[in-house]
Image (cartoon, rainbow, N blue to C red):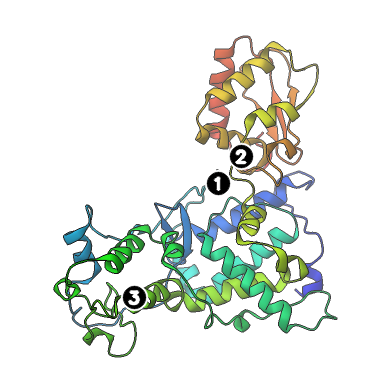
Amino acid sequence: ASHDELAKPLRVTFVGEEGVDQGGLLKEFFQLMVMALLNDSVVFVYSESSRAVWPAPLLTPPEGENKGGGLNSVSEGIADEPAESDVSLRRVEDVGNGAFVQQNDDHGKFLASLGLDAFRLLGRLLSLAVHNGVTIGLRFPPVMYRLLLLACRDASSAAPKSSRLWAAAAETFDLASVKYSVDELEGVDKRLADTLRVVESYSGDLADLDLYFQTGEGVELYPGGAQEVVTEENRHEFVRRYTKWVLRDSVRGPLSALCGAFAELVAGPAAAILTPADLEVIICGESQLDFSELERSARYEGGYGTNTSIVRAFWRLVHARPLEWQRRLLTFVTSSARAPLGGLGKLGLTVQRAGPDTERLPTASTCFHVLLLPEYDTPEKLATKLDAALAHAHGFGNE
């Protein structure tokens, strides 16, 4: 598709499902597409500490003996816990939006065959979501949002100002001049960042730690680095090169492809004034969930009102339940576990009476953010039925 075609409003229809796309179908489409890419270890890795995803390196460590004890031995000798990377590979993961996609080996092989095109696809999906005002429950480390904005600004400065959309090919975003910090590394791999801080502040003789200018996987941080011992004089250079390896060199191709594809549609004057935190909110929505704000802004139909007994019981239940359950409720009604820009008060939730007491479960119209709630006889029955509905909900309409 051309850039002008991509700039048009996007409408989605699922085969075999009825529904007019008023936003819910579009939101679910983006969630399913993104989760299909993220839920396979071939393409992305997941950090337990930051609950964020990061591109998986498309590199194979060199064969041969790994000289020296490495960073694991540093942590084992100094820190309370071993410095195992806290980045794990996930086959199926709920990254906060309530969507689960089960992958199989054939799917993993297919993604692996895409190579950099998988990252270009994700960058394009993210840019389309931003362009269409759809938030996605996707969490990147803070450094990723900085790189996305740098790509947008790079594209804006290079493209002709007469172009309706300031475009940049995925290959044009150059990471060579981008600098990184250990604080940014923490969002990708906290254990590794903590270990590098130990190296920087170690008061003993660093030569005793048997460290060389190579990664824990045996990759030299520069040609001949496996032969150079880390000392007090060069330790800061070691930390700088190791950080650059993790955040840039090991994932240079995937990052350039993802960020460049994102910039194709998003680059422009607005991107020049955004901060990384701003972009995170635009992509992910507000992370803070104020359900009191949602209650104050809710509308009621079908005979319900703020003083209806079942409505009061519903809000008591919502406020009493843990955050994970509350996110499930948001996903059930809106297809997203995050608040829109401006918070939950901007969501536009409607609670509509769906008949008298019954054994049927509550349902929802995700397109219009409507919860269809029967007037159950007791608060206990309300809780039981709503729990069951959230446990079994899947797909558009939840009906």
Percent of width and height locating residue 189: 38, 61
- Write the residue at 53% across / 73% down: 255
The residue singled out by tag 3 in the image is 236
The residue singled out by tag 2 in the image is 331
- Write the residue at 76% across / 76% down: 166
Q: Could you tell whether 23 is left or right of 395 in the image?
A: right
Q: Do callouts 3 and 1 mark residues in contact (Cβ within 8 Å)?
A: no
- 3 or 1: mark nearer the eye: 3
Count residues near mark 3 (Cα–Cα under 10 Å), then give few for <14, some for 14-19, many for 20+.
some
- Write the residue at 68% across / 74% down: 153
Q: CA distance from mark 3 to mark 2?
A: 46 Å
Quarter of the figure with the N terminus: bottom right
Residue 14 shows up from this direction:
no
Upstream in sequence: badge 3 or badge 2 = 3
Upstream in sequence: badge 2 or badge 1 = 1
Name the amino acid type tagged 1: Ala
Percent of width and height locating residue 211: 21, 75
Q: Secondary structure at mark 2?
A: helix
Q: CA distance from mark 2 to mark 1?
A: 8 Å
Q: Do callouts 2 and 1 mark residues in contact (Cβ within 8 Å)?
A: yes
Percent of width and height locating residue 361: 62, 24
The residue singled out by tag 1 in the image is 99
